[in-house]
Amino acid sequence: MAKTSNPHLLIVDSIAAGSNELDSLLAELDGQPGIDLYLARQRLIGRGPNLLAEGSREELATSAAILLRRGWRCWLLPTSKPERLPTHLRSIQIEAESLIFFTAGEPIVLERGMAVVAVLADLSGSVIGKYLKHLMAQKVYNGIDLAQPIGNEELQQAILRAKPVLDLYLLNSDGGVQSALRVLPGRFDPKGLGEAMSLSATINLQRILERVQEYASPCTLSLDFGLANLPGCRVEKAVDGGPWEQQNLASLSRFGWLITCLAADGPVRPSPRDIQNRSIVPGLGDRAYVGELLDELRDEKPPSAEAAFPTANPTPLTAPPLRPRRSGLSRPQWLSISSTAAGIGVFLALDNTAFAQAVLHYGIRPGLLPAALSVAFLWGGFHFLLLKRRVENTPTSKARSLAMGLVEIHGQARRKYALVSPMSQLPCVYYRLRRYRKNRNNRWKLSSCKESVHVPFYLEDDTGRVIVDPQWATVRPRSRQQGFGGQQSLLMDKASYIDRDEKWIEETIAEGTRLYVLGQAMENALRRPPLRQRVIEALRDIKKDPTELKSYDRDGDGQICEQEWSEARRHVEEQLLHQSLQEKGRTLPQQDRVIIARPQQRSLPFIIAETSSEAHLTRSYGLYTLPLFGGAILTVVWTVVMLVEYLRLI
C-alpha cells in the first residue's frame, strides 16, 4: 500500500513551439488525474525536461501511456531528496588516464571512459532574463514559427560571463551517482591545470569542463538550470532579498540530482525522434537524456498540414499598418462621455426636490420605470439566448473550404504583421489597453482605451489559413494583465518610477492561441490606393531623398524649378502606370483570398473568442441569460405590485 501511494513525478520532454499535434494531445489529456490543461500547455512548450504532473504511479500511468503513444519522451520518477550532495573542489591533478579532484574529504578520481553528468549553471539568474528577452525579440520580429532561440555555445558563454558554477556527477556502471563535485570559480587552486591555467577564474572553470569532456565517455552537459521547470529548482535573485545565493546552490543540488535520475532511468520508452534529439554532449545513449535546446526546432505538423501550406513564413513579418485617424470620437470615448453626462444629469435631477418627487410619482408609482427595466432585461436575455442558438446552429467550417456567408471556424491565431502588445511586449494578434487615472475622489477613471482592431491576422487550422479583420468584432480575450505607470515590462532590465495614481489593464490574444471566430466570409479583393494618392506618396519620398531629387535637377543649379518638378511628376506617373499594367491580373496568395469580417447584415453576430471549445462559449452565453431573465421576472413582479398599488390609490 505504501508503494502504491508513493508520490511520483511525470516529467516530459518539452518542444520549442505549439502545434496542432499539441492541441490534440491536450484534448486527450483532458480529465486525467493531476493534469491541468493550462499548466500542461505551458510545460509542454519550452526548454528541457519539465514537470507535467505529480501523483501516484498508478494515477500517472495513463497520462504517460498517452504521451508515449504520441511519440513524446517522458519519465516517471519517485519523489526523493538528493542522496549525495556535491563537495567543493580545492585543487586538481591531471594524469594520463585520470583526473584527480581534491576536496575536503577523500579525493574523487575520474578515470577515462567514466560516465559524467555535468551541470553548468548561473547562480545570479541574469541569464534567464537574457534568454527570455532574446526569444521574445525573435518572436516579435520574425514570428513565432521563425523564432531562433539562443544556441548552445551562446548560452554557455552567457552563463560563463554571469556567475557560473559547475556541478559534476560521476556515474558508476549501474547509472547511479558514485560521487559529486562542485566547482566554484576562484575557490580552488588552478595550478594543477598546468599550461592551461589562466589569471581568470572563469576561464579556469571552463578549462576544467573541457578536461572533463575530454576524459569522460560519455559526458552529458545540461545548461537548463533556471530554464527548465522542475520541482524545488526555483532560481532566486538578489533583488528578492534573503540568502539567495545559498538557496540557489540548494536548488542547483536538487536540479543536478533530478538530471542524474533522468540519465539513470532513461525515458519510459524511446521514441522515433530520440535519434535526432540528444543531449548537448552525446553519450549516454537512450539513458542519458537532458532536455533539448529550443534552437533545435521540431516539426510537429501532421502530414496533411504540411501539404496544405508552409509551416513558417518565408520572410520576417512586416510592421503593422498605422492606426487610421478618425475625425470623430471613438466608441469607448462616446460611452465614457455619455455615461458621465447621464450620471451628472441624474445627480442634478435628484438634487431638485420637485423633479425627484415628480419622477417618483409619475415614474415609479405607476410602474413605468420598473416596466422599462423589465423590457431592458428581457431584451438582453433574448439577445444572449439567440446568440447562443446562433453559435450552436452554425456548422464549423475549414479554412480551405469556406463558403461565402456566415461561417464558424476554429484554429490557431497567427500574426500577419509584427504586432506587439504595448505594455507586456508580447507577440500577439490583438490587444486592448485601458489606462485609468485617479480623480479627486481617489476613484479610478478611464482616461484612454486603445485596441489593435485595425490589424488583421491569420486563423490557421489543419487545412490552411484565412484572414480575420477584427474591425467591429466582439472580442473576448482571456489573457488579462494589470500594472501601474512606469512598471517594469518583460523586455526591460530595470523598472522606472512607478506611478501609483495611474494603472493600466491590458487584454491580449497571444500568437498561437486557440480561437473561435463567427463572422462573414467574403472575397478579399486586391485593393490598391488611387493613382493620385500613390503619386503624392512617391513625390513625397523623392523630396526626402536628396540623391534622387538631384537626378531631376536638369540645369544643375541646385534648385528644382516648376518645369523640372512637372517633369518629375510626369515620370512618376508613367512608372506607376507601367507598374499597374504589370500587376494587372495578379491574384492574391491562397491564404489571403478569403477574409472573415463584420457581416453586412448588422443583426448577424461577429465574434472572436479565445476559448478551448465551442461548449465553453455557449455555456458562458447561457449563464448570461440567467441573471437577465431573473431580473426581468423581478422587475415584472415589481411593476405589477406598483401598478396595483397605484390603481388602488386612484
Image (cartoon, rainbow, N blue to C red):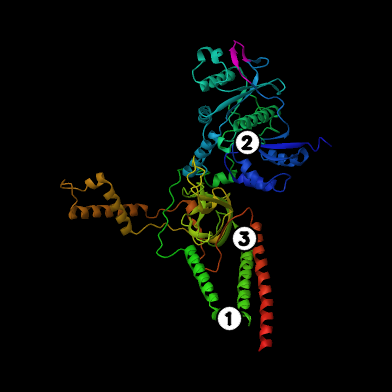
Circle 3 packing at 10 Å, graded few (<14), some (14-19), many (20+), is few
Q: Secondary structure at mark 3?
A: loop
Instruction: Name the kind of residue labelled 1 in the image.
Output: Gln
Q: Secondary structure at mark 1?
A: helix
Instruction: Name the kind of residue labelled 3 in the image.
Output: Pro
Residue stretch in magenta: 88-101
Q: Position of residue 353 (x, y in %)?
A: 55, 79
Residue at mark 1 to residue at mark 3: CA–CA distance: 54 Å
Mark before the other along the chain sequence, 1 or 3: 1
Instruction: Name the kind of residue labelled 2 in the image.
Output: Arg
Residue 561 to residue 140: above or below: below
Query: Any mark on residue 357, and which?
Result: 1
In front of the other: label 1 or label 3? 1
For disc 3, the marked residue is: 395
For disc 2, the marked residue is: 234
Q: Position of residue 348 (x, y in %)?
A: 51, 74
Circle 1 packing at 10 Å, graded few (<14), some (14-19), many (20+), is few
Q: Nearer the viewer, residue 619 or 24?
A: 619
Q: Is residue 467 visible?
A: no
Are the residues tagged 2 and 3 within 8 Å (C-beta)? no
Q: Position of residue 456 (x, y in %)?
A: 48, 54
Query: Any mark on residue 221, and which?
Result: none
Residue at mark 2 to residue at mark 3: CA–CA distance: 46 Å
- What residue is rendered at 51% in x and 34% in y? 150
Residue 201 to residue 438: above or below: above
